[in-house]
Image (cartoon, rainbow, N blue to C red):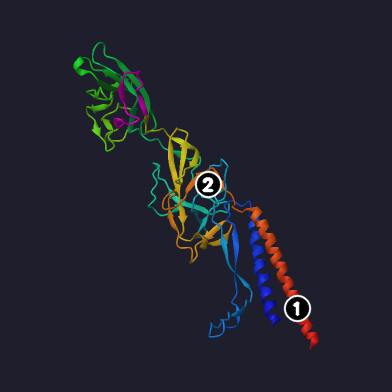
Amino acid sequence: MTERSILAAVSGIQANQTYLDGIGNNIANADTIGFKDSQVQFQDLLAEQLSGASGPAAGSAGVNPVAVGSGVRVAANEVNLQEGSLEQTGVPTDVAIQGSGYLVVQSGGQQFYTRDGSLTTDGNGNLSTQSGGLIQGWQANGQGTVNTNAPLTSIKIPTGETIGATATTTLTLGGNLPAWNGVGTSPTETTTLNAYDALGDVVPITLTFTGVAGAANANQWTVQGTVPKPSGGTDTLWTTAPTIVFNPASGQVTSVTGATTNADGSLSVPVSTMPAGYTFPAGDILSFTFPPPGSSAAVTQFSAASTVQIEGQNGYASGTLQTYSIGSDGTITGAFSNGATLALGQIALANFTNAGGLSDQGGGLYATSPNSGQALIGTPGTGGRGALLGGELEQSNVNLGTELTNLITAQQAYTANTKVLTTSSQVMQALENVQ
């Protein structure tokens, strides 16, 4: 049955040709960003049973079955999902996935997935792949808030666009007031910071801390704020200056008159009016916050120099987007010319029960298949999804040394199968000559 050896050799040639195709593709994509190499897996074909097995009997031993294989077939082309090495590029739109997951891409009305993080922005500011696919995620609102429970959308980075001014509503205090025993001349300490009204006009605010006189009032300070009026002169922020009381043993704030206690233990002292000429929203327009006592940012009273100051405020003038960066959770944070930083959006990641079952669409894109499972989409760093590394790219995971070794193996197997084919052909020719 020379035909059997011929058919087996032909199947071997075909299988090893596929093996060579896979190796060639791996080598060709050794420099392709995010590429995953694959390994062709062989499986033998059904063997032909020449004789069956027989069990041991009295006076005779058992006999094993006799079967001859009929060749080989390609059983699978397994994708190696191991991460490639990371390369730092410094390009703000470049992003690498550290861990499992795929970027979600919308292209031609279809949803695809990719590990290729060499992104760019198009003429409309859309974050996209090099081939024009739109990166999906969640766009932030004008206040920099991202709703990850909303449907996915294409992410836009508004380079050069202007954000409007935001009025200051909270000023945060910090630092140290020198220990005060109430005896002698009352000390005073001042600090000034620029806040902003709703139009972006600068509002200079000065706080003056004054030790309360009298031994019975040790460890107590009053605080009064002053603001210059646009029409001239100054106005005070409180009709009655709030009093700050410190614990002499711990140096921590124990109470502030007129303050409300927040959930985190911080104390907020509201201001009800501001001088005419500034534009602020209705209601409590400003609130001075003392961080939680005992925290690293708390206002303290120790025997040391005064460092008390307004640490920061949440308002800003109008400004234009200057730079942006991508964080590990996929948040794209923009830095504006007014010093403000706001979230512009957040990139989504998709995970799969069987990522090896994804269908390769070319161009670094994959689509779901019946054996990949549905895309499990969420934020990076959650639900088993990896983290993002902004300004970096994942390189191909192709190992050229391994591929060149496989190339030799495939060549030898291919050549050997052709020799089987040649020999079988010669045997058949010999039989025909005998006849």
State the residue in front, 107 or 310: 310
Quarter holding the N terminus? bottom right
What residue did someone put label 2 on? 95
State the residue in front, 342 or 69: 69
Q: Quick one: SS at disc 2?
A: strand
Q: Residues within 10 Å of mark 1 (few under 14, many from 20)?
A: some
User: At 50% from the left edge and 41% from the top edge, which residue is drawn?
Assistant: 159
**What amino acid is at disc 2?**
Val
71 vs 210, left or right, is: right
User: In the rendered structure, does residue 257 fall within the stretch colored magenta?
Assistant: no
183 vs 326, left or right, is: left
Q: Position of residue 231 (x, y in %)?
A: 33, 22
User: At 29% from the left edge and 28% from the top edge, which residue is drawn?
Assistant: 274
**What amino acid is at disc 1?**
Ser
Tag in front: 1 or 2? 1
**Quarter location, residue 144:** top left
1 vs 99, left or right, is: right
State the residue in front, 401 or 235: 401
Distance between the Cα atoms at labels 1 and 2? 57 Å
